[in-house]
Amino acid sequence: MEHASMTVPAIAAMAPAVRRGVIGMLDGFDRRHDVALIAVELVVSAIRAAVGDLVVRVCHLDGGAVRIEVRDQRGRQPQTSPAEPEDGAPDPLAVVSALADRVGSSRRGGDCITWAVVAPTPTAS
Amino acid sequence: MRFLYLLVPAVLLRLAMSAVGRHIPGTPPPPAPAAPSPVVPLPAEQTYGASPVPEYIRFCEADVRHRARWRLTYGPGALVPFRAYHLVEGVTVAASDVRILDVLLSQYEPPSRVRPYVPEDDAEREAERCLLAEAARGVA
């Protein structure tokens, strides 16, 4: 299982860089732009919740699927000014749910990990 | 007193002999120094060890490209060994691959900041207005 990762500070200016970085990690994967969009949504969600560093990790799973995970430190360094979402604003993680085949989250040692698995486009045989 | 004059050189002599390792009767003599090893000829083509930094050339290229804003380092053994420190913003990013780090550094745009040209406080604004008026009078 190959994996690549990057560590970035939890600031909004990093979101475009993460997007391009994830695309660069997934050369040859047909749904890399979907994975990049999911990565940005997960990163923005983590930035809203925590300060500190974020770890973005991309793993190639068996069967050609790709798992993207974003680890933040919301247990250790929580964001102290919670943003109030506007009424009717779309839930950014709904985009993740719509694009990914599987989505989940876990907490480990104060860190929060949100992840998504994206399978390649099935080829017509 | 004469005894002291004799004792001091004797002690010094004993110390010097122990330092050079004198031969004590009854003990085997110290081994002879090993014969010099035969000269091993150097291989015709001398090889050098691989660079500790993987993709060293690419790392150097990235360093040259981003040197004005970032300081690049490599930490062997870390999960994300390629690190970069922004010289102005003070942020640090890291990646497991130098290509990814290069992309990150190319895409990062530091957030723009509005410099506080206009004073927010009324008193501060009035003081600046007076200062400007005095400066204008001075020029006139």
Image (cartoon, helix red, strand yellow):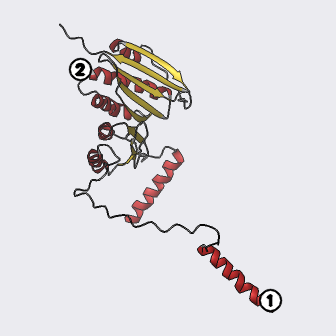
The quadrant of the picture occupied by the N terminus of chain B is bottom right
**Point 22% across, 58% down: residue:** B44
Q: Measure the alpha-carbon separation of dots 2 and 1.
A: 100 Å
* The residue positioned farthest toward the left in the image shown: A125
In the rendered image, the vertical position of residue A114 relative to residue B65, given as above or below = above
Label 1 Cα neighbours within 10 Å, binned few <14 / some 14-19 / many ≥20? few
- Please provide percent x and percent y for residue B38: 34, 64
**Point 43% across, 57% down: residue:** B133
The quadrant of the picture occupied by the C terminus of chain B is bottom left
**Is B132 on the left or on the right of A122, as rendered?**
right
Q: From the viewer's side, name the closer residue of A41 and B83.
A: B83
- Please provide percent x and percent y for residue B131: 46, 57
* The residue positioned farthest toward the front in the image shown: B26
**Point 32% across, 49% down: residue:** B51
Q: Secondary structure at mark 1?
A: helix
Corner quadrant of residue A94: top left
Asked whether residue A89 appears in the rendered view, the answer is no
Q: Secondary structure at mark 2?
A: loop
- Please provide percent x and percent y for residue B138: 41, 65
Q: Which residue is mark 2?
A: A30
**Is B49 on the left or on the right of B134, as rendered?**
left
User: Label 1 is placed on what type of residue?
Assistant: Phe
Q: From the viewer's side, name the closer residue of A122 and B86.
A: A122
Label 2 Cα neighbours within 10 Å, binned few <14 / some 14-19 / many ≥20? few
Corner quadrant of residue B23: bottom right
Q: Which residue is mark 1?
A: B3
- What chain does mark 1 sit on? B
Q: Which mark is residue A49?
A: none
Q: From the viewer's side, name the closer residue of B28 and A30.
A: B28
User: Label 2 is placed on what type of residue?
Assistant: Asp
In the rendered image, the vertical position of residue B103 relative to residue A70, given as above or below = below
